[in-house]
Image (spheres, rainbow, N blue to C red):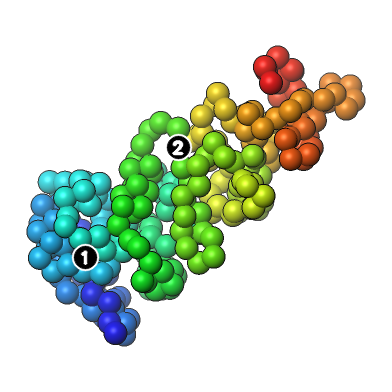
């Protein structure tokens, strides 16, 4: 069974390039294209694709508006030429974000992720992810992979974040979720009243800190509610001594 796909992008070259790459994918059939937001809504409602490649910013309507006006909810792969949109919601090891320009290898990775979730409920979570990513305020949710699915994770439920190479590990509910982004980028989207960077590799949820304990001259350790002990950087120790826990 072939998956019916629609391309919505205001750049003719981008549409042509993606159409050409999809032509080599045996299980995908490109059924239409749209060059602006209003045309995308009409095409989606008329053709009812199972898979939608949607540019985040197009004339007429932006991606969130397109998804809020359609009568069906296809699986969505967001595309954009703007790196600043590549925030947590899309590159958390998830399935639906492409930064232009991209080639066949990067597209194949995304298609494998899409194929893995075909048959799962689609729609509103994709709209939620786009709204979350474009928001300028603190994130309330992350989207993480669990048992082959992409699920929402309330940020307030996260005990701590830890940098691990090219990834960040989020610890919540006794589980560890790997997020494909930097700790610096994540820190910029967290509520600073709740989450504090205590070390170059650690951000903690202050609601889950039971104590900052001295362990030597000028040094502190953060003790968390699950019994974890984390080092506090020297440059942060003095400031953290005055935080209410």
Residue appearing at x 38%, y 58% in the figure: 97
Residue 130 in percent (x, y) is at 34, 47
**Front of the two marks 1 and 2:** 2
Q: Which residue is mark 2?
A: 139
Q: Which residue is mark 1?
A: 7
Label 2 crowd bin: few (<14), some (14–19), many (20+), radius 10 Å: some
**Discs 1, 2 touching: Cβ within 8 Å:** no
Label count reads 2
Residue 72 image-quadrant placement:
bottom left
Image quarter where the N terminus lies is bottom left
Q: CA distance from mark 1 to mark 2?
A: 29 Å
Residue 213 in percent (x, y) is at 82, 25
Q: Is residue 168 left or right of residue 117?
A: right
Residue appearing at x 47%, y 55% in the figure: 151
Q: Is residue 141 left or right of residue 131?
A: right
Residue 216 image-quadrant placement:
top right
The answer to which of 211 and 133 lies nearer the viewer is 211
Up-down relation of residue 16 to residue 163 (above or below): below
Would residue 154 be visible to someone looking at this image?
yes
Q: Secondary structure at mark 2?
A: loop
Image quarter where the C terminus lies is top right
Would residue 101 be visible to someone looking at this image?
no
* Dot placed on the residue nearer the N-terminal end, 1 or 2: 1
Residue appearing at x 27%, y 50% in the figure: 56
The residue sitting at the top extreme is: 242
Residue 55 in percent (x, y) is at 25, 55
Q: Secondary structure at mark 1?
A: strand
Residue 165 in percent (x, y) is at 65, 53
């Amino acid at each position: 069974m072939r998956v019916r796909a629609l391309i919505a992008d205001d750049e003719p070259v981008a549409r042509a390039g993606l159409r050409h790459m999809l032509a080599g994918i045996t299980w995908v059939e490109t059924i239409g294209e749209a060059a602006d937001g209003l045309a995308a809504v009409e095409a989606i409602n008329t053709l009812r694709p199972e898979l939608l490649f949607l540019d985040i910013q197009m004339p007429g309507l932006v991606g969130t508006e397109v998804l809020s006006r359609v009568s069906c909810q296809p699986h969505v792969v967001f595309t954009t030429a703007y790196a600043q949109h590549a925030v947590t919601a899309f590159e958390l090891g998830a399935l639906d974000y492409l930064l232009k320009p991209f080639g066949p290898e990067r597209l194949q990775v995304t298609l494998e992720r899409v194929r893995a979730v075909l048959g799962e409920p689609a729609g509103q979570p994709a709209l939620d992810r786009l709204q979350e990513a474009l928001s300028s305020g603190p994130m309330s949710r992350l989207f993480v992979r669990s048992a082959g699915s992409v699920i929402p994770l309330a940020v307030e439920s996260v005990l701590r974040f830890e940098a691990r190479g090219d990834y960040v590990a989020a610890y919540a509910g006794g589980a560890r979720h790997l997020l494909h982004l930097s700790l610096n980028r994540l820190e910029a989207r967290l509520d600073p009243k709740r989450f504090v960077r205590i070390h170059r590799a650690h951000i903690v949820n202050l609601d889950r800190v039971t104590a900052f304990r001295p362990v030597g001259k000028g040094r502190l350790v953060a003790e968390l509610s699950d019994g974890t002990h984390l080092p506090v950087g020297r440059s942060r120790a003095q400031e953290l001594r005055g935080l209410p826990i």
